[in-house]
Amino acid sequence: MNLKNIALITLLVIGSASVAKADSITGGIGIGGGVSQPWTSTTVFFNSPAVVTSTVGDFTAIPLFSQVTMASSFDYAITTPENVVIFTGPDGAELIVNQVTSSVLHDGTSVVIDGVATLDLTGFDPTVGNFTITASNNGGALSFEATAAAAATPEPASLALFGTGLLGIVGIARRRLSV
């Protein structure tokens, strides 16, 4: 094998080192019966268990009407809560609130809370998405929609090690040919 072929193979290997995509969640889930009265201007209270009322995308693996365990309450006045788990459910589903982006209390008859949360689901990487908690005199619900793009993760270091090994072989071959 001549020096040009070795150099070409090395460039092809290094050039083919791609970036892998993590398995992020896409779709949405709705939880019904999860929010109860009374709520306050800073806290919403949950009923447990609640049930899955709708699923879209990757969430379709979770059966409709399966039970989820809700937190007892959520203080939505804290805009950046730390590790507040809103619900846990089947398939390792766990919703952790990252940030409350808005909350609107309507004359004591309803409250709508929007924010950003991370959802864990078995078989997927933790995925950031948007959540909405709605409570009214008629009951309440929680929804989560994951629309985040997959995060880029580098290929294993073994591919880079292989490429640098080939570069070393090219260097040795070049030195031998020049002597």
Image (spheres, helix red, strand yellow):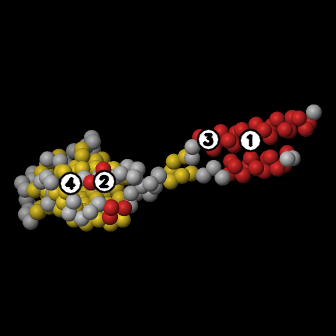
**Residue 171: quadrant of the picture:** top right
150 on left or right of 178: left
Of the image marks 4 and 3, the number of the one nearer the N terminus = 4
Q: Residue at x 11, y 63 (%)?
A: 139
Quadrant hosting residue 161: top right
Q: Dot 2 corresponds to which residue?
A: 91
Classed neighbour count for the residue bearing mark 2: other residues with Cα under 10 Å, few (<14), some (14–19), many (≥20):
some
Residue 117 seen from this side: no
- Gap in angstroms between the C-alphas marked 1 and 4: 53 Å
Q: Which mark, residue 166?
A: 1
Q: Amino acid at mark 2?
A: Asp
- Location of mark 3 (residue): 158
Query: Residue beneath label 4, please?
Result: 68
Q: Which amino acid does the dot numbered 3 rest on? A: Ser
Q: Quadrant of residue 166?
A: top right
Residue extending farthest top: 179
